Amino acid sequence: MPVHDSHTELQSAPSAEPNQKGSHLAETATRAAEGLETSAPRKSGLIPWLKRIGLVGFLFFFIKGLVWLGIFFWAGTCAFQG
């Protein structure tokens, strides 16, 4: 009677599970080659939107701060000239 090691059988058997990373990549490559899937999968729309808003908000307050520094500098130079 031959001894079967179930661990080696599981490793050598091809996976029929479609959720594994390797089979998904192979399926995506096959679809792209056939022309069925031409666009890249979209990321969640929320994260890039929040990053854009964060950058715009940072730039707005940075420029606003520089303007106020300029106003106080101008007011200080005018006050001490007279």
Image (cartoon, rainbow, N blue to C red):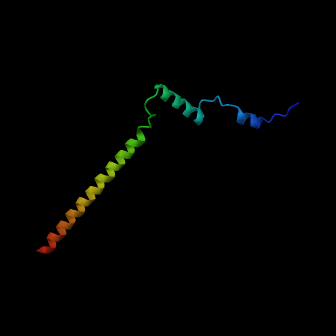
Q: Residue furthest right?
A: 1
Residue 70 horizontal/vertical position (percent): 21, 63
Depth check: give the residue in front, 46 or 28.
28
Q: In the rendered image, which quarter contains the N terminus?
A: top right
The quadrant in which residue 18 appears is top right
Which of these two is toward me, 46 or 79?
A: 46
In the image, residue 35 lies at what x, y percent? 46, 26
Q: Residue at x 28, y 52 (%)?
A: 60
Left-right relation of 28 to 75: right
Q: Residue, x 53% and y 28% (percent of image)?
A: 30
Residue 59 against residue 23 in the figure, above or below:
below
Q: Position of residue 56 (x, y in %)?
A: 32, 48
Q: Residue at point 24% right, 63% down?
A: 69
Residue 67 shown left or right of residue 26 in the figure:
left
Residue 27 in the image: state x and y as whole percent.
Answer: 55, 29
Task: Farthest residue to the left: give it.
Answer: 82
Q: Quadrant of the C terminus?
A: bottom left
* Position above or below: 73 against 1: below
